[in-house]
Image (cartoon, rainbow, N blue to C red):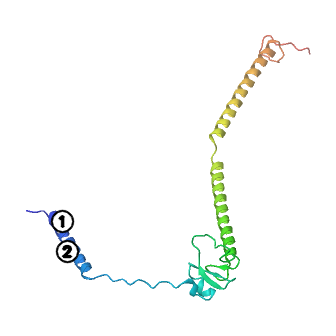
Amino acid sequence: MPSVTTLKQSATTSVFCAVLLLFVSCVTQGECQTTSPPPPPSCSSFKSCESCVPHAKCLWCFATNNCTDYPVTWLLPPASLCPLAQARWGVCWLNFEALIIALAVLGGTILVSIMICCCCCCCKSRSSRPDRDDETFARRREEIKQRSEQRKVDRKARHDEIRRKYGLIGDSDHPYSKFENE
């Protein structure tokens, strides 16, 4: 007698096969007919800056009042095609020269901002936790201070012993204390 799990597996498998068969039959019955989009108009067909610059592949030149294909092999259009101060690309109110300067300033500002943020983060993390060298230096300084205090105590004890020996300390319970003339 088959178990419940094997019955569920066989039902799932048969449903999956039926869906796959239906999908394959629907796809093979209809033929895909796609129409290619009409070719974009040539840049030379545009007669004004407002109609030329919305197309990314076109460049308007005010010096010659014509729309030309943007020379994609060059990053900047050559001066023989159009001077940079007279070239418009993207918008009519901004010449190509100003666009390049604005983008360079914007890019430089972003790079400087990123560098300043990185420097601030590095300096902040560096100053927030003490270095191992600082900890070692502080530990050594404390050890030197303790040894100095110990030597000071030992030196005072030796000096006091010498003073007692020669009676320079007024010690009343010491048998050899110096008599004072009254």
Label 2 amino acid? Ala
Residue 181 position (above or below residue 121)? above
| Towards the viewer: 10 or 170 | 10
Mark 1 burial class by Cα count in 10 Å: few <14, some 14-19, many 20+: few
Q: Residue at x 41, y 83 (%)?
A: 36
Q: Which mark is residue 9?
A: 1
Where residue 101 sits, quadrant-wise, is bottom right
> Which element carries disc 2, helix, strand or loop?
helix
- In the rendered structure, the answer to whether residue 178 lies left or right of residue 45 reads right
Residue 66 position (above or below residue 80)? below
Where residue 139 sits, quadrant-wise, is top right
Residue bearing mark 2: 18
**Mark 2 vs mark 1: which is more N-terminal?**
1
- In the rendered structure, the answer to whether residue 84 lies left or right of residue 55 reads right
> Which element carries disc 1, helix, strand or loop?
helix
Q: Position of residue 113 (x, y in %)?
A: 66, 62
Where residue 163 sits, quadrant-wise, is top right
| Towards the viewer: 107 or 7 | 107
Identify the image quadrant of the N terminus.
bottom left
Q: Position of residue 168 (x, y in %)?
A: 84, 16
| Towards the viewer: 128 or 166 | 128
- In the rendered structure, the answer to whether residue 15 lies left or right of residue 129 reads left
